[in-house]
């Protein structure tokens, strides 16, 4: 029998859990699924405790020496786990627009392999061109406007090395106990239509989550998808 487990998830954006901005959703895991309860204002990370991190590491082949960008890192819980995997010679860039998250993460991770930066992935960042092996972004792209999505795709293309990976984790586009309206979500097939990279795999990484992986390879199909992205 599954014992109820409470996982506090901040509704930083109304889009993720359908709640008011700045409130907590308490997800209670039971045999019948997840239940959401309202709470008080707090900051946190939406997916902490809900994703199969080991599956993510295996699928992305996280190993020492890699440079990973955790875009929209929140409190940095995934950045910290990535850092453990890429040590001693790798690096994790953890970026978020929220100054609170970045300041806290910077203070927690001094003298580690994590570089915490306040930045917006939908526009140019201070990172060097072709400097990243993996860009990881979790439950973020569904809140992008069309111009923001275009900016995100341009910056992804600029930052990734040749043959490098983009991993997008999103909530499934079907009825779930929490999440944004279905019309706001992306299915894996919809992401494949707009991301200007080569789709290589779709992996289930949680009860209600999938990870779509793309690779930075130039070919005719990529050019076709890139054209579609420009016309979002």
Image (cartoon, rainbow, N blue to C red):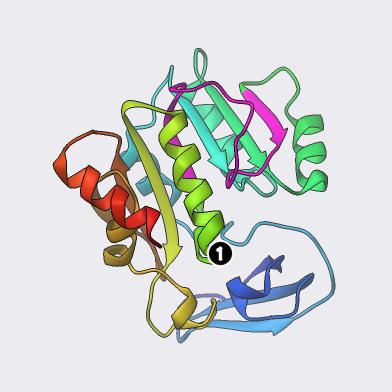
- Residue 135 highlighted magenta (yes or no): yes
Residue 41 is a magenta residue: no
- The spot of residue 165 in percent (x, y) is 35, 36
Residue 217 visible? The answer is yes
User: Compared to 61, does 136 lie above or below?
Assistant: below
Image: 97 above or below 83:
below
Q: Quadrant of residue 70?
A: top right
Q: Quadrant of residue 119?
A: top right
Q: Quadrant of the C terminus?
A: bottom left
- Can you tell which quarter of the image residue 25 is in? bottom right
Query: Residue placed at 55% from the left, 61% from the top?
Result: 144
Q: Eyeballing the image, is 202 above or below 88?
A: below
Q: Is residue 129 left or right of residue 80?
A: left
Q: Which residues are magenta?
A: 114-136
Residue at 72% from the left image edge and 57% from the top image edge? 44
Quadrant that contains the N terminus? bottom left
Which residue in the protein does label 1 denote?
A: 145
Q: Residue furthest top?
A: 89
Looking at this view, is 170 or 112 the one in front? 170
Q: Is residue 127 left or right of residue 214?
A: right
Which element type, helix, strand or loop, lies under badge 1?
loop
Residue in the picture at 55% in, 75% down:
3
Residue at 44%, 46% in the rendered image = 153
Please tell me how many numbered marks the rendered image carries.
1
* x and y percentages locating residue 33 in the rendered image: 47, 82
Residue 179, image x, y percentages: 54, 76
Q: Residues within 10 Å of mark 1 (few under 14, many from 20)?
A: few
Q: Nearer the viewer, residue 198 or 58?
A: 198
Relative depth, front residue between 184 and 19: 184
Above or below for 46 versus 160: below
- Is residue 139 at all visible to an observer of this figure? no
């Amino acid at each position: 029998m599954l014992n109820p487990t409470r996982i506090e998830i901040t509704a930083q954006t109304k889009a993720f859990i359908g709640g008011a901005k700045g409130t907590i959703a308490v997800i209670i895991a039971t045999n019948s699924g997840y239940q959401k309860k309202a709470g008080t204002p707090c900051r946190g990370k939406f997916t902490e405790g809900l994703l199969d991190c080991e599956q993510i590491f295996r699928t992305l082949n996280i190993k020492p020496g890699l440079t990973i960008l955790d875009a929209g890192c929140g409190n940095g819980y995934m950045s910290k786990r990535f850092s453990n995997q890429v040590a001693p010679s790798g690096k994790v860039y953890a970026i978020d627009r929220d100054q609170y998250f970045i300041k806290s993460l910077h203070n927690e991770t001094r003298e580690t392999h994590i570089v915490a930066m306040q930045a917006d992935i939908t526009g140019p960042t201070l990172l060097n061109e072709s400097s990243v092996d993996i860009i990881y972004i979790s439950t973020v792209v569904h809140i992008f406007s069309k111009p923001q999505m275009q900016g995100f795709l341009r910056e992804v293309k600029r930052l990734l090395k040749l043959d490098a990976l983009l991993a997008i984790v999103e909530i499934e586009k079907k009825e779930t106990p929490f999440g944004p309206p279905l019309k706001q979500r992306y299915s894996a097939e919809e992401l494949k239509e707009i991301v200007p990279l080569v789709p290589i795999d779709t992996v289930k990484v949680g009860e209600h989550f999938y990870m779509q992986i793309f690779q930075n390879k130039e070919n005719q199909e990529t050019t076709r998808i890139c054209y579609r992205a420009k016309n979002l």
